[in-house]
Amino acid sequence: MMGRPSVQYRFTAQKSLNLTAYANENLPTATSLASESDAGTKTTHDDGSIDYVFTGEEEEEEEELSFTLRLNPAGVLSSVAMNAAGLFKMTLTYAYGAQRVTLPSAAVTVDAATLAKAEAYLTLPARVKKAADKGAAHTRSAAKRKTVKVASLRKIVRKDVAAVNKAAGVTMVKVKNVTGGVRVYATNPWTQKTVAYTVKAAKKKVIVKKA
């Protein structure tokens, strides 16, 4: 629909993101792995590297966990190995240097706001019909089997259109006054196709018709 079949990625900018804070909160750092462990043991190897082994227990599972923190000869953390009572093992290897992230090209990327808008427009026909039908139903109810007033119809339909747009997250459906009522419509910005219905007062009735 958008004419971009090559798109594979959605991009969301988060300017307030602090990578250091994010890593501390979401990634298994050496400090977080050992913070709740019992006192560790130290082993120095012939090449100058050092292992610190910490043990602890998972409160819910009561399984013994062990963490082995390895420092290279320069005293810098190089890996962390975790062993959960022999059930599974995991080793994290740490590297240091300038961070380089290769981002997808613009040709295969779409921003999150545009994608959300496109997803909303996929349901354009149903949303336009829903706005017209709900507006008509609420207008009939408000008239209480009496003559339907055009001014009341226009006010009620606009309220229902606003509700439909709010649910869609996009100001998609629009309203225009026509003789005897309103025209409820929306145009897809990519395909340029328009879906429209008229909602008109006819004495004690409200008539919805596809335009």
Image: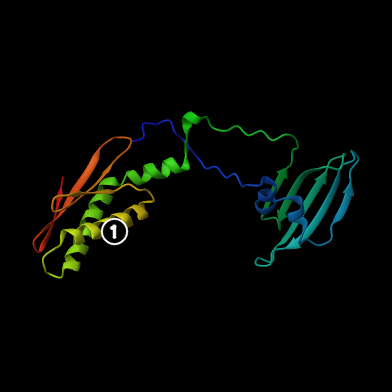
Report the residue at 81% width, 46% height from top.
70
Q: Nearer the viewer, residue 46 or 33?
A: 33
Q: Secondary structure at mark 1?
A: helix
Q: Is residue 160 above or below residue 146?
A: above
Q: Nearer the viewer, residue 63 or 207?
A: 207
| Residue 72 percent coordinates (x, y) | 84, 40
Image-based side of 173 in relation to 104, left or right = left
Image-based side of 104 in relation to 162, left or right = right
Q: Nearer the viewer, residue 61 or 109?
A: 109
| Residue 102 percent coordinates (x, y) | 60, 32
Report the residue at 81% width, 62% height from top.
38
Image-based side of 197 in relation to 123, left or right = left
* Quarter of image, res 61: bottom right
Q: Residue furthest left?
A: 203
Q: Is residue 94 above or below residue 153?
A: above
| Residue 24 percent coordinates (x, y) | 70, 51
Q: Amino acid at mark 1?
A: Lys
Image colouring: rainbow
Q: Residues within 10 Å of mark 1 (few under 14, many from 20)?
A: some
Question: How many marks on residues?
Answer: 1
Q: Check the picture and name the quadrant holding the N terminus.
A: top left
Q: Nearer the viewer, residue 157 or 88?
A: 157
Q: Is residue 121 above or below residue 56?
A: above
Report the residue at 36% width, 35% height from top.
2
Q: Residue furthest bottom?
A: 144
The residue that label 1 is drawn on is 159
| Residue 113 percent coordinates (x, y) | 45, 43
Q: Check the picture and name the quadrant holding the C terminus.
A: top left
